[in-house]
Amino acid sequence: MTKTISRRDFLKVGGAVASALTIGTILPPQVASAARQAGLLDAQGNGSIPTMCEMCVWRCGVLARVEGGRVVKLDGNPEHPHSRGKLCPRGQSGLMNTYDPDRVLTPLIRVGKRGEGKFREASWEEALDLVAANMLSIKEQYGPEAMIFSSTHNLSQVQFENLLNAYGSPNYGTQRSLCFNAMIVGNLMTYGMEEPGRSYDTLEYIILTGRNLAEAISTSETGDLIHAIDRGAKLVYLDPRFTKTAAKADLWLPIKPGTDLAFHLALLNTIISEDRYDHNFVEQHTVGFDELADSVASYTPEWAAKITEIDAETIRTVARDFAAAAPNALAHNGWRTSNFENSFQTARAIAALNALVGNWGVAMFAAAGEGSSALGAPPQPPYPRISAIRLDGVPWKYPLVPYKLGVFQELRDAIIAGDPYQAHGWFISRQNPVGSLPDRARTLEAFGKMDFIAVVDIFLNDTAWIADVVLPEASYLERYDPMLPVGDKAFLRQPVIEPQGEARSALWIYKQLGERLGLGDFFQYADDEDYIRQQLAPLGASLDEVKEKGYVLLPQEEEEDIYHWNTPSGKVELASDTLRNSGFASCPTWEEPVAPPEGQFYLLTGKVGQHTQFATQNNQLLHKYQDEPRLWMNPKSAEKLGLKDYDLVKVTSEAGSVNVMLQVTQGIRPDCVYMTPGFGHISKGWTTGYGVGASDSVLHISYTDPVSGSQALSQTFVTVEKA
Amino acid sequence: MTSITDPSAIKHRAILFDATRCIDCRACMVACSVENQVPNDVTRIWLAGGEVTGEYPNLQRASIPYHCMHCDDPACASACPVGAYSKHPNGPVLYDPDVCIGCRYCMNACPFDVPHFEWNRGVDEHARIIKCDLCTARVDKGGEPACVATCPTDALLFGDREDLLEYAHQRIKEHPDRYIDHVYGETENGGTSYLIISHVPFEQLGMSTDIPHESVSELSEHIMEFTLPFAFTWGAVLTGITIATHQMHKHGESKSAKETVEAEAKDED
């Protein structure tokens, strides 16, 4: 099923598309001439252009080597703090996404039935007119709330949100509830910020709770971890799987799924009962210590040992060593924390643990979000007032979930139920909800309710495959995006080659749509470069100089008091009135997770270093170096079921079933099985990724944590039998 | 830190791999494929080791991106009948596909099992050997090999072989509890430009440990040195024996009859 192309094909495809500069309705900026003016390319079109990666959301700095108008190699930009000259395998493979023969390079309009994948090519005018006409008609007939907008973490999302707000729909789907809602809301309730920064410089003791940094790679942080271990820092790693991070740990704790909370409650208990906490920090900078102490009084290591299946002495030793190493210690808050319905409590316990031993200011520090007040923006008229409630239950069902996070799986279920009202259209940009939402059958059912589906993407991903209109976006090496502040600089993503075919930037697509929807006043930029110039205007920097360096220095903001937190009390909240007043436990509290019935396994999800979620499986270079995606099972369990390595097995949950090849490995608890997510695509428009592996989204059941709105991805139980 | 020597000062280009730092992410492999435009169905770097070993929950796992070792005295070059292999003055073992006739003697000669043949291509497609060249073109321009440059955890370091050896021994000395006390490649096959230090036995990394510490080609050259003396000496010995035998045959009957009589006489005693 795997498809490969030879080097000759690779060159042919790349050369053909690179030279196919076609004339659209509006001419895109001429990259080569712009880059030449900025001194980045010589007369032959050769040179090195600084830009930013988009193979995951870490967004490393990239130096793109261009030869004759073709990008031939990407290297990490030494000046970018996220890459420091390095790139991970996904970053290295980025040009293959751009030169993928499966790229969509003209607008497409569906001609067959949905899901048949039959499209005809169309002009931008026709495609945009069609999308705008449908969006206007839905607004007129059912109100703006009948239109769903969804998009995943990207730099042009600010203009996607602009389109959503200008159109007037409250219904916004992001990937966040499938990923890190529990961690973000946990940090907001404790520190008043989404995610504190971390420093590995002086760390002596690190607890990673399912944060598989060796495979869920964040280039600079992964490097930091390995260097900290190299210096002698101790790593404690909690995971039911022996991952590549576990292989680097001093102590791998194959904890029972769903019980990370009990482990951390016992750490809190030990540190408080043995008086190993930082009295100064707790007294001066926290509220609710006594309440926390009472709340965790019964969570002894002996209590936790029975639940976690980690012996009490080990838990006690970890608590003591962690407290002894503080403030050069870190209990990592995790990233994709959507594991169990109690994951929010785990996030709160981890947040409290770091505060208790006084890691603040050494291992952790305040981190600004992705905005900067120093950058300008196009003028913005006020948005229309929204009267309809949100379908995903924020805030009427989920009072503490931030608007921009949302609860995506609940949005999908409300669409199916048509309750509290029926949605009719879905506009999706750079996202693949058919792949990523739990319970794929239900997701497809929700899309089936739509009168109209439009997708912006560079490929026919699974969602584009069932869409009515596909708008081809320029790849990240072919376009501008709004600038991104990181530390004291704002970095630029700029085109390093001309967009291929008719592909266009998201900034251009959103503006064109906005104008056709009568919302032109909300898009006050002439083109992408004008947008960046407006961002740079307050800094007095020219676009050419920023293009050359790849970044602009931001004025240094006055040093804020590092001991002030944006919580109601202004302190770190070990006990939270916000939680109490919303009817939730004010302190981290034990919530018993559900466990699989006899004969069933926990279905674990996770990451591999060669792929990003559901987005990269068609990349031929990553395909070349990935492991075959199989179902992991411990040999003891396999023996009981009479199964062997490479058997084709049928995996069944309440939501569905898939067939997948078995991988018998010692590296997993006997009560768990594991599947790498992102495989088993339905789109045949992905000729490399189609037919490879199976989708765990088919199996996942939707469970939502009531506090953070987080989906519980490891709460699905499965049976396994020979297929 | 990916280069421990100023690139312009490197006399003997080499790479040091530290298995304790490798996370098996394969960025090196992808970077190599892009930099060298390696076709998608073959690779210049592959993975050795990587299996989870031990019994749950006492497990280990380590791997190595494996490629040409760039021997100081390459057996491939000795074996190649047409001179397709050459030793770059700064260390890399280079391969010229335009000279290669596809005989694959190099594959048999290499003690590290490195040269790979494009079996899935036909002779008419000019099927040839796939092998690392230590990114010679990239390094000649002042850069580092693509694999080293991108390694997110600095598991790969580039530098002068002498500097890397000194650094490797210093690491082992500083952390005797962490490393196996051996720099693989320092003496294997007479010394290589890919050096390896590891926390797990080298077999577990998938490295062969029965490689002679003298180069294979040097061994064969030693043997070949004896060819002429051997031919002359052995020839002389054989000639001598032939002459002697011939002379004995002349007096053969009487001598053997006399001996027989003497033997019978002894038996009777």
Image (cartoon, rainbow, N blue to C red):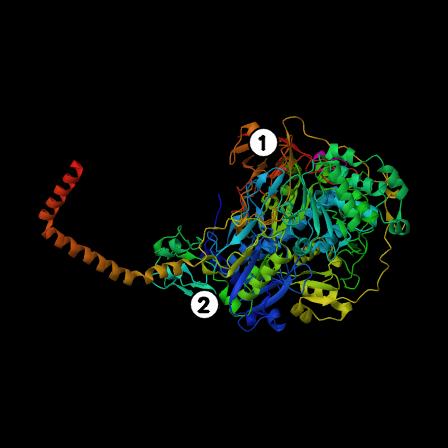
In the image, taking residue B182 as reference, residue B190 lies left or right, namely: left
| Disc number placed over residue B88 in the picture, else none | 2
The location of residue B47, given as percent across then percent down, is 52, 50
The location of residue A75, given as percent across then percent down, is 59, 62
Q: Nearer the viewer, residue B40 or B106?
A: B106
**For the magenta stretch, what is the residue range?**
A415-421
Q: Is residue A171 above or below residue B243?
A: above
In the image, taking residue A31 as reference, residue A265 lies left or right, namely: right
The amino acid on which the numbered mark 2 sits, given as a three-letter code, is His
Q: Is residue B27 above or below residue A178?
A: below
Mark 1 vs mark 2, CA separation in Å: 53 Å
> Few, some or many C-alpha atoms within 10 Å of disc 1 (few <14, some 14-19, many ≥20)?
some
The location of residue A560, given as percent across then percent down, is 85, 60
- Do badges 1 and 2 share one subunit? no
What residue is pinned by disc 1? A636
In the image, taking residue A34 as reference, residue A523 lies left or right, namely: right
Q: Nearer the viewer, residue A170 or A619?
A: A619
Q: Chain of mark 1?
A: A
The stretch drawn in magenta includes residue A559: no
